[in-house]
Amino acid sequence: MDIVIVKNYIEMSKYAAGLVGDCIRNEEHPVLGLATGGTPIGLYQLLVRQYRECLLSFKNVRTFNLDEYIGLDPTHSKSYHRYMQEHLFSHIDIPRDQTFIPDGMAASLQRECRHYEKLLKKFGPPDLQILGIGENGHIGFNEPGSDFDGHTHVIRLADSTREANARYFQSLNEVPTHAITMGVKSILRSKKIVLLASGERKAAAVNRLLEGKPDPDFPASALTQHQNVVLVVDQQAFGK
Ligand code: F6R
């Protein structure tokens, strides 16, 4: 794992935007794996800026999001569908049918998981996968105890994840209890993985990741088994 320590959130976002920009320029049909949450917002703002300045086009890009809450309509203000529209898709020239996010409202969630995995196999794997890290070590919504061999599946969110994500909702009660997530194995198929971590809240998780021991109770540790991972971490999250 390559480790890039940067000063702060802005520098982390800039570094990540550079890697995403390189990927889009170098690949004929780039496939990006995308995350939501607070961490990549700065990255998405920079990508939108590069598009507006005609430095980047997303016309040939396909995107796969890691996860979506179960039970939130795509128009719900806290759904990841809506998040992606607001932070990225509605501001750039990506054709809508080239963006994929699991459907948390699907009548059959099992079928939706299989369908998403098929799409990943057909168009993927991502050339570059952006990841954030949960305070409990989750990647995507692969919670502690997740199988490293897992594909896209339904997961019950850990209490610690619901508590951490309550900051994005009005109250803890509103945070969905379940999600669809790409599995650890689906994530590890990506050609390159860029893991972003910013702020003191992530320091313990980053520290544990750097211990380097694969442990299903700490899903991010699966990344130590991948040959092309860049951890872009700011000084606060690096904790030293
Ligand atoms: C989001 C996702 C999660 C987040 C993680 C960190 O699509 O898959 O793994 O990356 O929960 O969230 P933030 O960035 O809000 O701290």
Image (tube, rainbow, N blue to C red):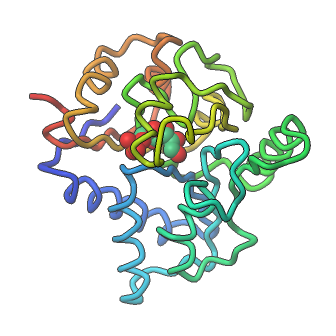
- Considering the image in quadrants, where does the C terminus appear? top left
- Considering the image in quadrants, where does the N terminus appear? top left
Q: Residue farthest to the left?
A: 240
User: Considering only vertical position in the picture, is 122 above or below 111?
Assistant: below
Measuring from the top left, give residue 55's x and y in whole percent: 39, 84
Image quadrant of ligand 1 equals top left
**Does residue 224 appear in this view?**
yes
**Does residue 132 appear in this view?**
no
- Determine the residue positioned at 61% across, 59% down: 31
Name the one closer to the observer, 37 or 8: 37
Q: Is residue 122 left or right of residue 80?
A: right
User: Considering only vertical position in the picture, is 107 above or below 56?
Assistant: above
- Determine the residue positioned at 79% across, 49% down: 105
Q: Is residue 120 left or right of residue 24?
A: right
Measuring from the top left, give residue 200's x and y in whole percent: 19, 34
Q: Is residue 121 left or right of residue 53?
A: right
